[in-house]
Image (tube, helix red, strand yellow):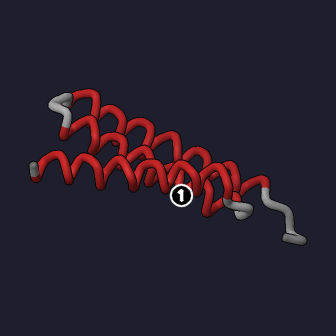
Amino acid sequence: MASELIQFGILAATIAFALGAAGLKNLLSAALSLGAMCLCLGALYWTLYAPYVGLFQMLVYGGAVVVLFVAVIMFVRSEGQ
């Protein structure tokens, strides 16, 4: 019972961060929301007894890809914004 509630909470946070990544106007906030969504999705995989997939999700997507997105946003952003 408790693990189902934890999984449901993680799923709700994942959906909330996904909606934030898709709906936020600020690109940096959207990228950080995407990173949080990837971390929550990795935690959900971990609770579903797939630790290697969860670890891969957290490290590669939650770490490397989001850092690349944030770096590109910072480099491309113009002076007027």
Name the outermost residue toward the left: 1
Instruction: Identify the residue at horizontal 42%, vertical 49% (top origin).
Output: 14
Q: Check the picture and name the quadrant holding the C terminus.
A: bottom right
Q: Provide residue 64's location: percent of width, then percent of height.
A: 46, 41
Name the outermost residue toward the right: 80
Q: Provide residue 18's location: percent of width, then percent of height.
A: 53, 48
Instruction: Decide: is 35 above or below 47.
Output: below
Instruction: Identify the residue at horizontal 69%, vertical 58% (top origin).
Output: 27
Instruction: Decide: is 30 above or below 64.
Output: below
Amino acid of disc 1? Leu
Instruction: Identify the residue at horizontal 52%, vertical 40% (top origin).
Output: 65
* Residue ID for mark 1: 32
Q: Provide residue 11's location: percent of width, then percent of height.
A: 35, 47
Report whether 45 appears left or right of 4. right
Instruction: Identify the residue at horizontal 61%, vertical 47% (top origin).
Output: 69
Tally of marks: 1
Name the outermost residue toward the front: 1
Categorize mark 1 by other alpha carbons within 10 Å: few (<14), some (14-19), many (20+).
some
Nearest the eye: 80 or 46: 46
